[in-house]
Image: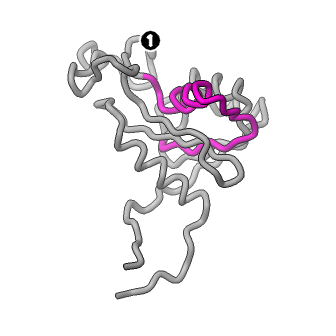
Amino acid sequence: MERRTTRSDIDKYFLKIASVIAERATCRRHSVGAVAVKNKHILTTGYNGAPAGTKDCLELGCLRDALGIPSGERHEICRGVHAEQNVIIQAALHGVSLEACTIYCTHTPCVLCAKMLVNARIKRFVSFGKYNDDSFLSLFRETGIEIDIKERPPSQITYLD
């Protein structure tokens, strides 16, 4: 058995966690996961899917696909709540401030999520995947949110058995 000799860097670690969170997504187009982190501690998580207690796209099919709506357009024609929105909602439900935290997400945000993250006063956004909307870039730069686009972390988990 080969022994692991290095420790995963913190960004890679939390991006890998965001990837596992994305496995719960119920969107047929993108599986997106997000995790809010402050001082190396997880505050909240979120993935994209239908509102709690409602039927999801895996069960009902994708309305956007049925109507031929491209990714990144007409967000209102979707039953899904974005992963970043769910991170913020979970924080609100549990009385957790996201101020000065880092959001690790499998994809860059749409402009609607970016506006919410600005108002949640996050400090940093880290991702490896690209959503079909770059308008978040100028908004994050204007408001001083640090943007880090990393390489996709390996999907392999190293165990010490």
Identify the residue shown where x is 37% and y is 16%.
78
Range shown magenta = 81-106
Q: Quadrant of residue 136?
A: top right
Rendering coords of residue 76 (x, y %): 44, 11
Q: Amino acid at mark 1?
A: Glu
Rendering coords of residue 27 (x, y %): 33, 30
Image-based side of 47 in relation to 89, left or right: left
Total residue callouts = 1
Identify the residue shown where x is 78% and y is 36%.
144
Vertical placement of 49 versus 157: above or below?
above
Membership of 85 in magenta stretch = yes
Identify the residue shown where x is 52% and y is 39%.
45
Image-based side of 11 in relation to 18, left or right: right
Circle 1 SS class: loop
Residue under label 1, please give it. 76
Rendering coords of residue 104 (x, y %): 57, 45
Image-based side of 55 in relation to 33, left or right: left
Q: Is residue 72 visible?
A: yes
**Farthest residue in the front direction?**
94
Identify the residue shown where x is 56% and y is 54%.
150
Q: Is residue 134 visible?
A: no
